[in-house]
Image (cartoon, helix red, strand yellow):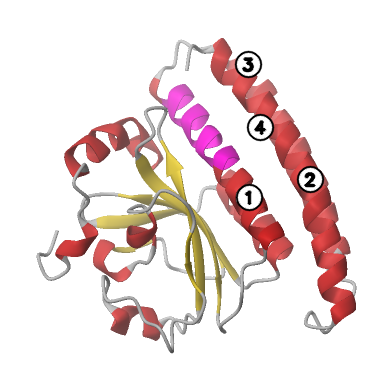
Amino acid sequence: MSTAFPGLIPDDEDLRLDALRPYRVLFQPNQPLFNEFVSILAKLFAVPIALVSLVGADEVIFAGNVGLPGMGQTARSNSLCSVAVLHEGITVFQDLLQHPCNLVNMDAVRGLRLGFYAGRPLRSPGGLAVGTLCVIDRKPRLLSSTEQVLLDHMGAVASDILLLEATFANDQTLSRALWERVRQQVQFSLTRMDTLAELGKHEDDQETDAARAYRQSSQEEALLVVQAMQKELKQALAGLGK
């Protein structure tokens, strides 16, 4: 990686890259399952952009991408996801115009017209950050407490889905029936969340008090679905010894 942005390299980078190795089978942009996942996430948060990213040594791969068409990957130094993997919790930039991030190439960020970013690290079983789940807006905004909790739980779900997908892709001896059953459970939960997200779009003006209240209600309902989804995924991972 270019030494022009040394602040993007964490102290545990070698360990992080080792943890990332099993996920390299997923270094393919715009995978249908993750595209659907981030599409629903964007609706729930009423933002135009959401991503599932995998942060490599030099590049960031967008395994799931809504809102940045034609962009499957970018240089690590150009991505705020590279900053999010440095932190334990959710990284938030409320106003990138007034408060830019000096750890990345802000010319690239400005070129995408990004005003807001919130990213939650996606972690390996050993707790090392391999990527992020993020929501992005063109304009500055706040991340509510309800949204913070929802993003955190959805990040945990995305971490588990990544692990399951990588596990099945790397080991062809595993039961395909189990893989299909888990995917069907995930799909069912995503469909329920998508229905809730669509209900939250009942008003044209998303900034009215009524729209915000309705969106929060949809987010709270979606959180219950996500929590149930977490339990199902943990059970599947336990069955695989993960």
| In-image side of 157 versus 40 (left or right) | left
* Residue that numbered label 4 is attached to: 230
Disc 4 and disc 3: Cα gap in Å? 17 Å
Q: Quadrant of residue 200?
A: bottom right
Between residue 168 and residue 6, name the one nearer to us.
6
Give, as a single range, the part of the protein colored magenta. Answer: 156-169
Between residue 124 and residue 67, name the one nearer to us.
124
**Total numbered circles:** 4
Residue 25 against residue 193 in the figure, above or below: above
Q: Position of residue 152 (x, y in %)?
A: 58, 48
* Residue that numbered label 3 is attached to: 178
Q: Is residue 99 visible?
A: yes
Residue type at mark 4: give it: Gln
Per the image, label 2 sits on a secondary structure element best described as helix
Residue type at mark 3: give it: Leu
Position of the N terminus by quadrant: bottom left
Q: Residue at x 85, y 75 (%)?
A: 211
Between residue 133 and residue 149, name the one nearer to us.
149
